[in-house]
Image: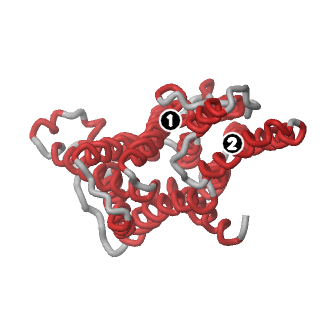
Amino acid sequence: MNLKSFFYILIPTFLFSSMEIALKIAGNQFNPIELNFIRFLIGGLALLPFTIMYLRKHEIKLSKSDIGRIALTGFVIVVLSMTLYQISIGMAKASVIAIMLSANPIFGLIIGFVFLREKLSRTNVLALVLTLLGLLIIINPFHLTGAMGIILGLLSSIIFGIYGVMSRVNGNKIGLNGLSMTCLAFLFGSAELGVLMALSHLPIAQNIPSNFSQFVNIPYFQGISLQTLPLILYISVLVTGVAFGLYFVSMEKVGILQASLIFLVKPALAPVLSLLILGEAMQVNTVIGIVVILLGSLVTLMGEKIAYSVMAIFRKNNPEAHQDVDELAKVKEELENGERATEAVVRQKLAEKRPRELPSED
């Protein structure tokens, strides 16, 4: 990895790792639903110029069905996942919620396997088991504190995994790259959230129990001042807009596997930043859980490389398999660079071309 590629990963990693801390600080000054609305509205607007250039360059015109797909994707990420996420930060430690969100790629694997019939290799299963074990160690069900915040954080991470699958599938159908799909989903999601916020001002909303007062008369831009503006801009433009944007750019520049380093480092870096900035002490079980989750992330990151190394050895020892293994390696490279080709499609073509068993990547 060269220096330029390193910075493509380093910057969003730091921004994502500081996200929970910034939101925790801002949560003391803003309604959590209002803060969620502001950050995704401004974050989406920050990415809008790049999206417009992409749409014009590729001459993409959105149909009604395209808009429907984007609106549904935006509802899942902004209204559902990130609203639960923002509320959970106010109810539990920022470091714990950061770790919960970092597990979303694993949930994405499960969702892709169940609904899209995507292949789940043994390395992915092992990573899944390690991640779930790490989460269980951190939650510590025998001495559970802040249970509701942890449950909401876990639910937010699962829904975030659903969003990841939806964004990929819908983006491919429409013809949008990751950054453009993210921008439009943010804008549509914030608009949908804004409509729901308007409903909180109706007389019927006054019947909501006092324990849920944050859902009554939700303000839109209350609390923004010269003192709070730098924090809002940091959360909205940098943490939301730039971080998500660079994440998708890093996928295109350095590949999906190396870009996943962002979520590999975040579980370790976020608790350290929470300790230094918020003074949140790390419990022994949290440290152990972080190590286990990092092992799971490492398996996810390195599992494919190990598998294809084995396939390369197979190629040397079996010259007849040379062509098939080479073609699979090329497809792997295309997938890492964001190409739309899927391994399943290529395997099918290879099977038609040469009907014999290929070496298993497991």
Q: Residue at x 54, y 40 (%)?
A: 104
Q: Residue at x 55, y 31 (%)?
A: 118
- Could you tell whether 294 is left or right of 345 in the image? right
What is the x, y in percent for residue 46?
Answer: 37, 67
Q: What's the amino acid at mark 2?
A: Leu
Q: Residue at x 88, y 42 (%)?
A: 316
Residue 275 can be seen, yes or no: no
Q: Which residue does the numbered mark 1 point to in the structure image?
A: 154
What is the x, y in percent for residue 11?
Answer: 59, 66
The answer to whether 221 is drawn above or below residue 159 in the figure is below
Q: What's the amino acid at mark 1?
A: Leu
Mark 1, residues whose alpha carbon is within 10 Å: few (<14), some, or many (≥20)? many
The residue most toward the right is 317
Q: Secondary structure at mark 1?
A: helix
Mark 2, residues whose alpha carbon is within 10 Å: few (<14), some, or many (≥20)? some
Identify the mark at residue 29; answer none if there is no mark. Answer: none
Q: Secondary structure at mark 2?
A: helix
- Could you tell whether 155 is left or right of 272 in the image? left
Quick one: 131 or 125, which is closer to the camera?
Answer: 125
| Image quadrant containing the C terminus | top right
* Image label count: 2
Quick one: 339 or 146, which is closer to the camera?
Answer: 339
Q: Earlier in the sequence, mark 1 or mark 2?
A: 1
Give the alpha-carbon distance from disc 1 to disc 2, as whole Å: 36 Å
Q: Residue at x 46, y 34 (%)?
A: 155
The residue most toward the bottom is 226
What is the x, y in percent for residue 197?
Answer: 21, 47
What is the x, y in percent for residue 133?
Answer: 67, 30
Q: Which residue does the numbered mark 2 point to in the structure image?
A: 328
Residue 222 can be seen, yes or no: yes
- Could you tell whether 172 is left or right of 72 in the image? right
